[in-house]
Image (tube, rainbow, N blue to C red):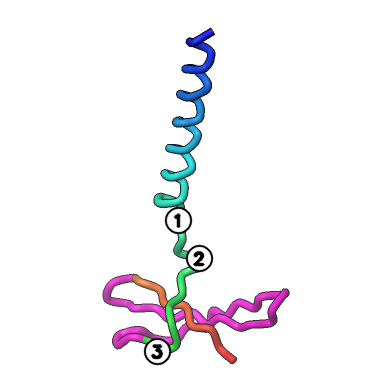
């Protein structure tokens, strides 16, 4: 009977570790809060997305030197 309780404890530890790894490793680039000031070196692109729920526009800025992208919410 003790091994059954031990099995449940091990399973709970595995689930908790998976949840923690998922939280810290999960790709959060889409929802990053980039702010309102576009950094130097970034140029505006024609890429604009519209959130259908809130109606917010997000413009994409691109840095040709590094390949990074910056997302700025427009009013």
Most foreground residue, 27 or 64: 27
Q: Residue at x 45, y 31 (%)?
A: 13
Q: Badges 2 and 1: C-beta atoms under 8 Å apart?
A: yes
In percent of width and height, residue 34 lies at 43, 78
Q: CA distance from mark 2 to mark 1?
A: 8 Å
Q: Residues within 10 Å of mark 2 (few under 14, many from 20)?
A: few
Q: Secondary structure at mark 2?
A: loop
Judge from the rendering whether residue 68 lies leftward or rightward of residue 3; answer left or right. Answer: left
Q: Residue furthest front?
A: 2
Q: Which residues are magenta?
A: 39-67
Upstream in the sequence, badge 2 or badge 3? 2
User: Between 1 and 61, which is closer to the camera in this rendering?
Assistant: 1
Residue placed under numbered mark 3 in the picture = 37
Image check: 56 left or right of 15? Answer: right
24 and 30: which one is in front? 24
The quarter of the displayed image where residue 62 is located: bottom left
Viewport quadrant of the C terminus? bottom right
Give the x, y percent position of residue 11: 50, 25
Whole-percent x, y for residue 59 in the image: 52, 82
Q: Earlier in the sequence, mark 1 or mark 3?
A: 1
C-alpha distance separating marks 2 and 3: 18 Å
Question: Which numbered circle lies on residue 27?
Answer: 1
Which residue corresponds to mark 2?
A: 30
The answer to whether 67 is drawn above or below residue 44 in the figure is above
**Which one is in front, 41 or 64?**
41
- Between marks 1 and 3, how big is the CA–CA gap? 23 Å
Name the quadrant of the N terminus: top right
x then y, percent, for residue 10? 45, 23
Asked if the stretch drawn in magenta spans residue 65, the answer is yes
Is the residue 44 above or below the residue 18 in the image?
A: below
Asked whether, in this view, residue 17 is left or right of residue 40, the answer is right
Label 1: state its secondary structure. loop
């Amino acid at each position: 009977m003790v091994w059954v309780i031990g099995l449940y404890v091990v399973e709970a530890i595995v689930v908790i570790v998976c949840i923690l790894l998922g939280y810290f490793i999960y790709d959060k680039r889409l929802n990053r809060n980039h702010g309102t000031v576009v950094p130097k070196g970034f140029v505006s692109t024609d890429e604009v997305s519209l959130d259908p729920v809130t109606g917010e526009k997000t413009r994409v800025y691109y840095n040709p030197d590094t390949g990074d992208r910056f997302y700025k919410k427009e009013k």
